[in-house]
Image: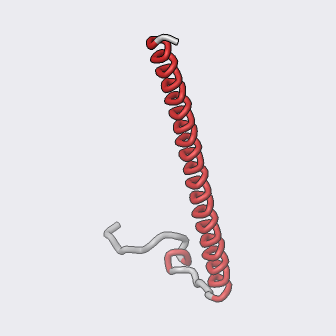
């Protein structure tokens, strides 16, 4: 085998190995970024569920407090919604 053919074979082999390793690295990076997206989505879902649970607790507490507390109508409600200010006419 001539020297030129040996260099060509070596360069081709190194180029192929470089391309294969780059493609493998790029696939690993894509996989990692997709996994981070899944983790972000799971975190958002967890936060949403926590907020929903907190909202339900607050709603139940509000219902309990409304049952326990009696709210009397204000003076404005008793007079038909009009307040008498005594302004001239």
Query: Which residue is drawn at the image coordinates 61% and 70% (left, top)?
Result: 55
Relative to 8, is 46 on the left or the right?
A: right
Q: Is residue 57 above or below residue 72?
A: above
Q: Is residue 13 above or below residue 29?
A: above
Query: Which residue is drawn at the image coordinates 61% and 75% (left, top)?
Result: 58
Relative to 70, is 88 on the left or the right?
A: left
Q: Is residue 40 above or below residue 82?
A: above
Dividing the picture into quarters, in which one does residue 28 lie? top right
Front one among 64 and 13: 13
Relative to 28, is 8 on the left or the right?
A: left
Q: How is the image coloured?
A: secondary structure
Dividing the picture into quarters, in which one does residue 87 lie? bottom left
Front one among 88 and 67: 67
Residue 20 on image: x %, y %:
56, 30
Query: Which residue is drawn at the image coordinates 49% and 22% (left, top)?
Result: 10
Question: Which quarter shows the C terminus?
Answer: bottom left
Front one among 27 and 19: 19
Residue 84 on image: x %, y %:
42, 74
Query: Which residue is drawn at the image coordinates 52% and 38% (left, top)?
Result: 25
Q: Is residue 68 above or below residue 10?
A: below
Residue 76 on image: x %, y %:
50, 75
């Amino acid at each position: 085998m001539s020297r030129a053919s040996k260099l060509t074979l070596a360069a081709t082999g190194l180029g192929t190995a470089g391309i294969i390793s780059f493609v493998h690295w790029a696939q690993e990076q894509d996989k990692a970024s997709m996994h981070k997206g899944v983790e972000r989505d799971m975190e958002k879902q967890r936060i949403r569920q926590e907020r929903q649970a907190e909202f339900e607790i607050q709603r139940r507490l509000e219902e309990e407090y409304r049952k326990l507390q009696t709210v009397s109508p204000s003076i404005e409600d008793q007079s038909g919604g009009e307040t008498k200010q005594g302004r001239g006419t």
